[in-house]
Amino acid sequence: MTLKPGDLVAAVRKDIRQARGAIRARRARLDEMIAEAEAAVEQGRRDVAATSGPETAMAVAGWRELAAEAAPGAASASWADWPAEPEPAESGPCLYRVGTAAGEVPALVPLLDSGHLKITGSQTPLADAIVDALLVRIVATTRPGSVRVSLYDPRRLGAGLGGFHALSRPGLLTVYGVEEFKDLLGSLDRDIRRIQRDVLGGGHSSLSELAAATGRRPEPWQVVIVQSPARGFRDDEVAHLNSVMHAGAACGIHVICRDVPVEDASGIERVDLTADGRITTSMTGELPVTAEPPPPELVRAVCERAARWAGIERDPPRFAELVPHRMWSESSAAGVRAPIGEDVDRYEPVEVLLGDDPVHALVGGPPGSGKTNFLYAMIGSMAARYSPEELEFYLLDFKEGVSFARLASGRTDKTWLPHARLIGVNINNDREFGLALLRFLARELERRGAAAREHEVTKIEELRAADPDGHWPRMVAVIDEFQVLIQQQDKITDESLYLLNDLARRGRSQGIHLVLASQNIGGVQTLWGRGAILDQFTLRIALPKARRILADDNPAALQVARFCAVVNAESGARQANRIARLPDAGVAGTFDALQRELWQRRPEHLAPPRIFDGAHVPELMTAPALPPGESAVGQLIDLAGSAATVRFDRAPGRNLAVVGTRADEAYDVLASAVLSLSRGHAPGSAVFRLYALDPQLEPRVGLLARRLADDGHEVTLGGELPEPADRDVPEYLALFAVDAATGRAEDLRRAVRRLVEHGPERRMHVLGWWRTTDRLKADVVERVGNVRNIDAWVALDVRDSELSPLPGGQMLSWTPRHRRALFHDQRTGVPPQPIIPFEVMSETGDGVA
């Protein structure tokens, strides 16, 4: 008999209907057994209250049989009866054993596809035993990879599940740190919304119902263990957790609370621990329960087996596999291409490409996902293939860390990556430096465009062919946590977005590529209103749990294991996913060994990269010497690390004012100005007059005077302010804390006013420090009006609204911050700009002068 295709389809459909009917019947029978079990427990409670001894055993005699049916096999077996290889299931049993009730029967609680568990009491070993027993049974009786565990245990920093840490290798266990509870709740919120919207879609009330109807579970269960911190939870945190628990069970999210004051509600079972070690559960009532901690070797075996079967049975690739046999053997004329890992399915390299298409890359991943490791793998792989003549890196890290610092010369390792032309670290508070890099790249874009027009070509590959003697490497700017640059509503954000958009659009033709990396770009409103920027970043790399990197209908990042990445060259479209297993590029003997070898190969003429460290305070002695009459007050936040300078000549207004209450920084600014002037003048070619108008500053000003005298300069300390008069050599009057002077204040004010007004034309210049703008204005302005006889100023902890009386101080946006100042020199025509005040060291280098 020959079966027609239509008959075959009908037969298969019939089998599917029968299978679904069997599942529904089994589910109904399971519900009946749970009801019978609960009824038996309730009867046992009543019998225990009325009787004791043998009668108790008789009252619960039927519980063991009911329990075996409700939670078959390893879910309810004692450890002595534990099967060698528990049979995993697609749907989790409803009841799990947490111990033994009344000395002989399993004490069971529901969890997966049911609700949550609340453990109260401070008996940590007992609570550990209960949680460990639950997790072992859950991991062993479900398909490997179908259950993911999150742990928030700030008291013990994640040590509470020590035996389960093998699950962290494939991403089945995530431990949240002390300050990451908000991140945990936010992640659960997003999962609940996504599952309700995209998975259930209004067609089913829960994942368990969907799995019963389709025979397939589309989402893993999530078991979340929450231990209260020592400080306890705030009310808003508890309320947030309550809302997660209310909606979470239907989405496969089940919370085990330990000493957390969440609400008692339907679907939340209780396990109560007393100070004397007594355990009771809401399922077994007054029946005493004995905890049964699982054997440690069993925990390890179950977790190792689950980890292997979850997809990491083979080791990740080695970093050395990314390095070619012949270093620097490839041309970047058409683009740069480099492997970053191994395809998890096809056992072949996964490459990233930056060229004509794709041009730029967007990298995303939350803390601990391996984002920095990926960047190292990419940078190292590219640097091994292309020489510094072919490829240049510009590397910025906005977070408060030093991810790229190891690519520069250090105290112990003097090597540096030859391809790195700029390395910026710890620049979270110096967004101006990120803007400076974008301005530099924009200028380079224009330079290359002009060269292309001159040679009548349209792109970098053609320019290199037309001008073989020119220096036209591919330029790759990697900006980690780039969202910091554009997360505020101000002029820096506006200009940065404009430049990013321009570079994203035109970088293709000129060989300038951007790699933007972030932990989270979802909240950066300035990005999402300007889709044209991110549309240009067609290469997307999503690390585990990354959000908004791939397309909205592409959940691959939520499912990928640890040490893996989703590499997608079609703007995150679902069909373009490639899953790459990444090497560990951070351990000793990997990237550091490659950098050492590349450094030894570097061309002799190649200079080290420019380093900017936002946490470093530059020293005055590292600044270059200046011409006579020119002083340095700090370091500009630019790519070159230039000094902010003021030239004192005979033009009106050539004075300097420092404003602010931070005494140490104000002293450093004035002392820097004086010492840099002294370095430019030969001994005898200038006179220095120092005035410590605050007695507390006298020792430091005295030390500064000795330094000047030791260098051969004519210096006076204190005394009366001189009258403006013609001088043969310049005289510099440094006034420390002008508004702290006591006695004859009005005489001092008149003398300062005459000096700033008439001194510069007679080669006498005032360098003064005032604590407030109002006092500065009162001292130097005779009538109503703004300050016009002091061209240059440095503002410390002064709000932008207070700077309006100063030249150039109108319409400013300035937020004071530690060890930063705002500098302006009216003569240059440049708007006020942030600087880093120099640190002025003593002669011995062991203190501040």
Image (cartoon, rainbow, N blue to C red):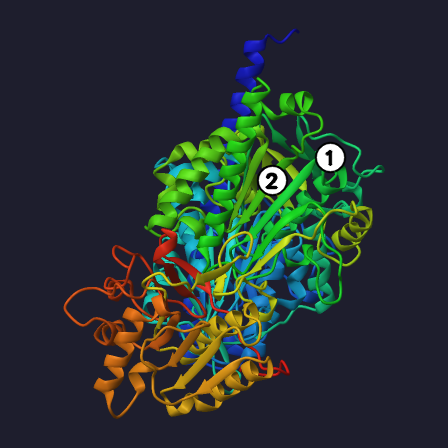
Does dot 2 land on a helix, a strand or a loop? Answer: strand
Quadrant in which the N terminus appears: top right
Check the image and report above or below for 104 versus 327.
below
Q: Residue at x 32, y 81 (%)?
A: 738
Between disc 1 and disc 2, the foreground one is 2
Q: Is residue 264 visible?
A: no
Q: Residue at x 62, y 80 (%)?
A: 845
Does dot 1 land on a helix, a strand or a loop? Answer: strand
- The mark found on residue 493 in the picture is none
Residue at far right of view: 325
Is residue 398 toward the left or the right of residue 133 in the image? left
The residue wearing badge 2 is 476
The residue wearing badge 1 is 349
Type of the residue with mark 1? Pro
Badge count: 2
Q: Residue at x 49, y 29 (%)?
A: 506
Check the image and report above or below for 628 versus 843.
above
Relative to the observer, which residue lies in front, 207 or 383?
A: 383
- The mark that comes first in sequence, 1 or 2, is 1
Could you tell me residue 39's position as x and y percent? Answer: 42, 62
Could you tell me residue 312's position as x and y percent? Answer: 71, 47
Type of the residue with mark 2? Val
- The CA distance from mark 1 to mark 2 is 22 Å
Could you tell me residue 530's position as x and y percent? Answer: 37, 36
